[in-house]
Image (tube, helix red, strand yellow):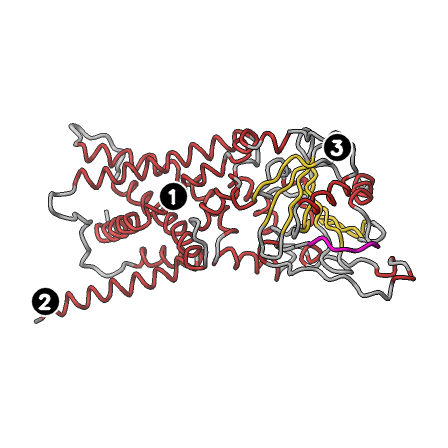
Amino acid sequence: MNKGLYNRFWRWHFYAALFITPLLLTLTLSGIGYLFYPNVENKAYDDYFFGKSAHTEKLTIDEGIEKAKGQFKGYSVSKVIVLKDPYNTRLTMDDRNGDEKYVFLDDNYQIVGSQNAKYTFSNVMRNFHSSLFVGGTVVNYLVELAACWAIFLLFSGVYMAFKGKAWKKKQNASHHQKNKKWHALVGTIITLPMIIIIFTGLPWSAFMGNFIYSAAQEHPSIGIPELKQNPPTSNMSEIPWATRENDAPTSSDGSGAHAHHNGMSGMDMTNSNRLSVQQLMTKVEDAKISKPYSIIYPSTEDGVYTVARGSNTGVTGLDVSPYDEITTYFDQYSGKLISKVGFDEYGLLGKWFTWGIPLHEGHLFGWPNKVINLLVCLAFIFVIFWGIKTWLSRKKKGEFSAPPNTAKGVSIGFGIIMIILGIMMPLFGISLLIVLLIESCFWFFKKRQLSV
């Protein structure tokens, strides 16, 4: 066995685990919480999702929307979510401060209740998982960095397990050797599924996520089709001649809290010429688009109604199979179906993440997906636990007992592996340079002290 390479991996594995274990536990536990958010919300918000209003008068959906706007002054509708029975219809409403509210309408389109979007279970878990409730670029980078170093931990752990033959049966094995065996064995088993879970979560990350999204936009043949990036416009000639010269309505800023998950945004505008939601829903039905789907309002006078079925919406009851994902554009004045783009039109990169995100979220292939993700996450927690036990079982009293430093320089094999990982995960590569710089400084000062 190459002792120098082994010790190098062992030392970096130890220190990486020491610094990122709290973050890894946080990400794993919050990930488990998010995994079951539809199950939790179906129970916790039963009255909102499936309840009925005390008012039994039958309204049109447009009357229900107007009633909601009247009850919640200062809020405008940005999205209508039409779900399958027995779910109620859900309105997303925003105010000018960026606050978001969910309002539920029953089958008579009467108001059942409302929620502050910020404090729903799914959004709390998502915020906890992605930004630790703190948010900001630094925290988002820190979360991504922990995920990247977790991949290094898995790779280096597998290398040491095979090189050290950690699972080989030993006579009269010590407590330390038993802990090491279980740490190595379970860690090796979950390496592949854990790496898949981590990589399918990277589209949300701050650094690599933006890189992936930019690549998908710049290269539509492998990523996001041009039509989905730049939706068509409504035909302005559909506006009646008598009112065509009137000042066009303006929309609020579509950034921030109004942004849709795929970059689109909408805001309800006062426009008497525009098709009503009820009329649009008839057009949607004629176009053979089945529930569930979301309706995103036009944000400009020449904007379009966007009707979408998504595989990674983060909304209970709205997700569909990746193969059924579709985004359609309807003229806001005539209701004409202008164009549509579906899974088959996506490039390879777009298809991978359209398929990968629901796999990460645990709803790609029903409850077995949730169970597999749960078992992998629990096994990962146990690997961390056994790792800590392994260290404590060999730790000498009063000493830190870090793995021994190797006197040799960085080997070619170690360098190649780290370069490959650094290219695959740029933020990891940047942190790697910082670690190497720190280690070089320690080596320089130590050498200087010995020479004095």
Q: Please, what secondary structure does the residue beneath circle 1 have?
A: helix
Mark positioned earlier in the residue sequence (1 or 3)? 1
Q: According to the image, label 2 marks what residue?
A: 450
Quarter in which the C terminus is drawn: bottom left
Q: On the image, which quarter does residue 266 sit in?
A: bottom right
Q: CA distance from mark 3 to mark 2?
A: 83 Å
Taking the spot 62% from the left edge, 53% from the top edge, the residue there is: 95
Q: How many marks?
A: 3
Q: According to the image, label 1 marks what residue?
A: 26
x and y percent of residue 358 in the render?
A: 56, 40
Q: Residues within 10 Å of mark 2 (few under 14, many from 20)?
A: few
Tell me: residue 450, above or below residue 270.
Answer: below
Q: According to the image, label 3 marks what residue?
A: 108
x and y percent of residue 104 in the render?
A: 65, 38
Taking the spot 64% from the left edge, 29% from the top edge, the residue there is: 50
Question: Disc number at residue 383?
Answer: none
Q: Please, what secondary structure does the residue beneath circle 2 have?
A: helix
Q: Is residue 408 magenta?
A: no
Q: CA distance from mark 1 to mark 3?
A: 43 Å
Q: What kind of residue is marked 1?
A: Thr
- Left or right: 162, with 394 as reference point: right
Tell me: residue 328, above or below residue 248.
Answer: above
Magenta segment boundaries in residue numbering: 267-273
Q: Is residue 271 magenta?
A: yes
Q: Residues within 10 Å of mark 1 (few under 14, many from 20)?
A: some
Q: Residue furthest right?
A: 242
Taking the spot 66% from the left edge, 32% from the top edge, the residue there is: 87
Tag nearer the camera, 3 or 2? 3
**Magenta-highlighted stretch: main secondary structure?**
loop
